[in-house]
């Protein structure tokens, strides 16, 4: 297995592991209650308590979003890439029949706001796909496209085009689209062997200026002022600014700056925010993934023990660290503890088979 394949498979399995770790302790915003129910340090898969989110899901089992990521990976393998028409068919035939318009319903015991809106629009109202995007500012489209980033990791233009188009189908907010594409660009960059450090944003901005990434920028490559009297480039990109590409570098600098102290590391969730919105999720995931760049276990466990929307935090952190350490350096107990882990491993292998 090549280093690239190891990192790509590590990214997908890392996302699955983080998602499954969050099934039990998901959405405890009162940390005292979380500690009462699960102890002061969660270090393995757990089951949800009665009447909580994901009721009925077993320890180590994926809930709804993890299953959607799994189905997205299988779709990309079958279809040999992304196109909008076949994706919409897959959603209509496989995904939407198993979700719900009720929060505490659907596969996995919970259906998110974005997926509830899609269910209501497509199943209950029968609206065309061109009219179903909602205003949700959460990470569902970002999560769904983790396999897309892996599949197109060596083709940034197709990666950005596919994820931009796919996100817009479900979530209409341009900032959410920008952040979703940016995260998956960072993920692909790590899969390609770059480091998650303070220099990553400059490398991404070089790709903006070369036209490889569709973000607007008027500054020079080093963020210096544009030249007086010079017009901005006409190809300003799909997104209003490049800021979504700049934040990972700042988070990585914070993680490696000895004067910035967040101890224990799980308290990054308090610093950057425990709620579900994408602008709370990404800073903590970037911070933890940079701080624990070679320690998958510590990274995902600090993500889980931060409470709040810890399931997504651990999923994104797991993907980012998995992309750095590779599948070979993810502790075996996390892989073997996943329900149907052999099938998930096979999917991760098939998703990147074209690169071997």
Image (cartoon, rainbow, N blue to C red):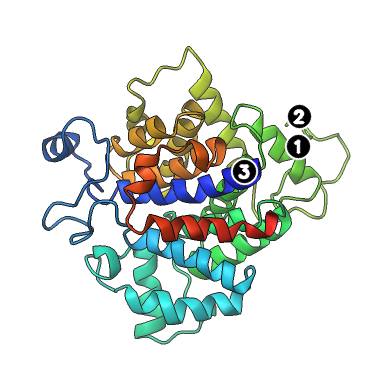
Circles 2, 1 touching at the beta carbon (< 8 Å): yes
Separation of residues labelled 3 and 2 (CA atoms): 29 Å
Residue in the image at 70% along x and 53% along y: 156
Q: Is residue 243 left or right of residue 274?
A: right
- Mark 3 and mark 1: Cα distance apart in space: 28 Å
Q: Position of residue 103 (x, y in %)?
A: 25, 66
Q: Which residue is mark 2?
A: 224
Question: Which image quarter: residue 253?
Answer: top right
Residue drawn where x is 79% and y is 50% of the image: 211
Instruction: State how far apart marks 2 and 1 are (Cα).
Output: 6 Å
The answer to whether residue 187 is visible is no
Label 1: state its secondary structure.
loop
Q: Residue at x 75, y 30 (%)?
A: 222
User: Which of the pair 57/309 is nearer the observer?
Assistant: 57
Q: Which mark is residue 219?
A: 1
Q: Residues within 10 Å of mark 3 (few under 14, many from 20)?
A: many
Residue 19 left/right relative to 83? left
The single residue placed furthest to the bottom in the displayed view is 126
From this viewpoint, is residue 164 visible? yes
> Is residue 191 toward the left or the right of residue 114 in the image?
right
Residue density around tag 2, few if under 14, some if 14–19, many if 20 or more, within 10 Å: few
Which corner quadrant of the image does residue 130 belong to? bottom right
* Residue to which mark 3 is pinned: 191
Label 3 vs 1, first from the N-terminus: 3
Expressed as whole percent of the image width and height from the top left, the position of residue 295 reads 45, 29
């Amino acid at each position: 297995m090549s280093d690239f394949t190891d990192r790509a498979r590590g990214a997908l399995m890392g996302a699955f592991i983080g998602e499954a770790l969050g099934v039990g302790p998901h959405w405890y915003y009162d940390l005292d209650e979380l500690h009462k129910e699960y102890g002061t340090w969660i270090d393995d898969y757990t089951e949800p308590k009665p009447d909580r989110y994901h009721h009925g899901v077993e320890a180590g089992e994926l809930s709804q979003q993890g299953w959607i990521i799994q189905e997205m990976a299988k779709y990309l393998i079958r279809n040999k890439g992304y196109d909008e028409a076949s994706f919409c068919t897959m959603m209509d035939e496989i995904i939407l029949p198993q979700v719900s318009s009720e929060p505490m319903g659907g596969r996995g015991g919970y259906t998110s706001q974005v997926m509830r809106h899609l269910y209501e629009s497509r199943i209950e109202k029968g609206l065309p796909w061109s009219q179903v995007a909602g205003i949700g500012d959460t990470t569902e489209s970002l999560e769904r496209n983790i396999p897309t980033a892996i599949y197109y990791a060596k083709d940034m233009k197709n990666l950005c085009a596919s994820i931009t188009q796919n996100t817009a189908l479900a979530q209409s907010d341009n900032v959410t689209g920008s952040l979703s594409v940016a995260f998956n660009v960072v993920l692909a960059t790590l899969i390609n062997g770059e480091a998650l450090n303070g220099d990553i944003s400059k490398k991404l901005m070089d790709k903006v200026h070369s036209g490889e990434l569709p973000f607007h920028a008027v500054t020079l490559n080093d963020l210096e002022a544009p030249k007086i009297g010079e017009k901005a480039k006409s190809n300003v990109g799909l997104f209003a600014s490049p800021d979504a590409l700049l934040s990972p570098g700042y988070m990585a600098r914070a993680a490696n700056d000895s004067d910035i102290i967040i101890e224990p590391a799980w308290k990054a969730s308090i610093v950057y925010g425990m709620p579900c919105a994408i602008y709370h999720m990404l800073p903590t995931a970037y911070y933890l993934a940079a701080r624990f760049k070679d320690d998958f276990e510590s990274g995902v466990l600090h993500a889980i023990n931060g409470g709040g929307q810890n399931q997504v935090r651990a999923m994104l952190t797991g993907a980012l660290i998995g992309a750095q350490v590779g599948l070979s350096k993810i502790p075996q107990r996390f892989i073997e503890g996943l329900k149907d882990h052999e099938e998930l491993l096979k999917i991760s292998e098939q998703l990147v088979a074209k690169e071997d």
